């Protein structure tokens, strides 16, 4: 298909012409496959991904304007969809739900120990309430690092980030928790 005929074929396809739709499908699918190959995605999933992206492009076909060129327009949609997919997989990779309380399991031998254990138990409940107010990603990170005891190196590897970026994120979360603790003490 020549560039000057692209708009004609797109209009025919949008108006229900099967031959034009088939021609356009082959062209778009070829562009998407080239883009996937360029991004080094050529495994078994790529066939399904190419099909999904082709459907996505066809769904957006009504937004195509005559001053666009088809190839860069399809490549941009494909690239954006791949970025979204990567972000989704990255965020979905490690999730731990914590249903048990943050209990410190302290055994007491005398009255002083009993008082200390009750204070620590109260602090555990308080900490649990403060952590539950965090957004799900931050809460998950705190659970993995402090309660599941992942090392920073392992956690950074699992989250596809650097150790320093992870450390910064943990420090930001700890600062948020400190502010919430200070704020709740001011309210009491």
Image (cartoon, rainbow, N blue to C red):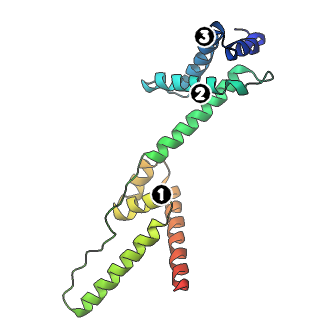
Nearer-the-camera pick, 164 or 18: 18
Q: How far apart are marks 1 and 3 (CA)?
A: 44 Å
Q: Earlier in the sequence, mark 3 or mark 2?
A: 3
Residue pictured at 51% horizontal, 42% vertical: 88
Is 162 located above or below residue 132 in the figure?
A: above
Task: Report the residue marked by disc 2.
Answer: 56
Percent x, y for residue 171? 51, 66
Residue sitting at the far left:
109
Is 97 located above or below residue 83 in the figure?
A: below
Nearer-the-camera pick, 166 or 7: 7
Please, what secondary structure does the residue beneath circle 3 have? helix
Instruction: Please give left or right for residue 145 compared with residue 63 in the image.
Output: left
Q: Earlier in the sequence, mark 1 or mark 3?
A: 3
Task: Report the residue marked by disc 3.
Answer: 22
Residue 151 image-quadrant placement: bottom left
Residue sitting at the far top:
19
């Amino acid at each position: 298909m020549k560039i000057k005929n692209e708009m004609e074929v797109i209009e025919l396809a949008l108006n229900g012409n099967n031959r034009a739709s088939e021609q356009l499908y082959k062209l778009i699918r070829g562009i998407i496959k080239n883009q996937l190959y360029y991004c080094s995605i050529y495994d078994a999933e790529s066939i399904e991904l190419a099909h999904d992206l082709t459907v996505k492009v066809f769904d957006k076909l009504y937004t195509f304007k005559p001053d666009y060129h088809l190839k860069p327009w399809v490549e941009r949609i494909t690239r954006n969809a791949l970025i979204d997919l990567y972000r989704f997989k990255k965020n979905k990779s490690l999730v731990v739900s914590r249903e048990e309380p943050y209990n410190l399991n302290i055994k007491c031998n005398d009255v002083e120990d009993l008082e200390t254990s009750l204070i620590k138990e109260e602090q555990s409940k308080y900490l649990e309430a403060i952590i539950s107010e965090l957004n799900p990603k931050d809460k998950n990170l705190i659970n993995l690092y402090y309660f599941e005891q992942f090392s920073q190196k392992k956690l950074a590897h699992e989250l596809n980030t650097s150790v320093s970026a992870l450390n910064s994120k943990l420090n930001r979360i700890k600062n948020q928790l400190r502010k919430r603790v200070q704020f709740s003490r001011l309210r009491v």
